[in-house]
Amino acid sequence: MAYNQLGFALSGLRTVSFAQIDAAYKKTGKTDLISSLGFGIDINDHTISCKARFSFEKKKDQPFLILEVESLFKIEKNDFKNKVKQEDNSYLVSKELAMHFAVITVGSSRGILHAKTEGTRYNEYLLPTIDVKQMIPENVFFKL
């Protein structure tokens, strides 16, 4: 399917979770960053959500820093009805648009992480650039 430009606006941004876990922190050693993305839909409000979660680990499965951020994107009503909603009553967000939403969410997460850790020992842990193409291999479909 070809990419259809939608009329949309960033309508919300929230920190879903944030934690600094001192007991899991070690000053030395390799730091692993575990990242994930997810999408949601509110058909009544014509909103697509993009949620990004990041955890920094020095010990496997023991994160010392966790951040989860959700961005809300309000889709223009006619575009939602005519371009997002499909004939089989499923809903589609093109891969390109999903990547755009993800880039905005990851960039916002980077700033939130900095603001929340400023003045702490955790401020040295920055979100690197992330290639969201690898995290979104195809169009995003919702079947309700």
Image (cartoon, helix red, strand yellow):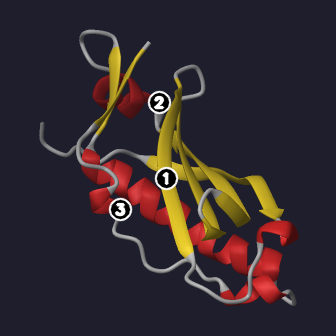
What is the secondary structure assignment of the residue under circle 3? helix
Residue at horizontal 28%, vertical 60%?
A: 133
Disc 1 secondary structure class: strand
The residue beneath circle 1 is 36
Disc on the earlier residue, 1 or 2? 1
- Mark closer to the observer (1, 2): 1
Mark 2 or 3, which is nearer the eye?
Answer: 3
**Mark on residue 109?**
none
Along the line of sight, which residue is nearer the eye, 43 or 120?
A: 120
The N terminus sits in image quarter: top left
Residue 76, compared with residue 85, is above or below; it is below
Q: Residue lying furthest top in this view? A: 88
Judging by the rendered image, the residue that carries numbered circle 3 is 132
Q: In this view, does 90 lie to the left or right of 48?
A: left
Residue at x 23% of width, y 43% of height? 138
Which of the labelled discs sits on residue 77, or is there none?
A: 2
Q: Which residue is drawn at 34% across and 69% down?
A: 131
- Residue 98: x and y in percent read 36, 49
Instruction: Give coordinates of residue 32: x percent, y percent.
Output: 53, 72
Label 3, label 1: how far apart the Cα atoms are: 10 Å
Q: Quadrant of the C terminus?
A: top left
Closer to the camera in the image, 58 or 16: 58
Q: In this view, does 20 lie above or below 79?
A: below
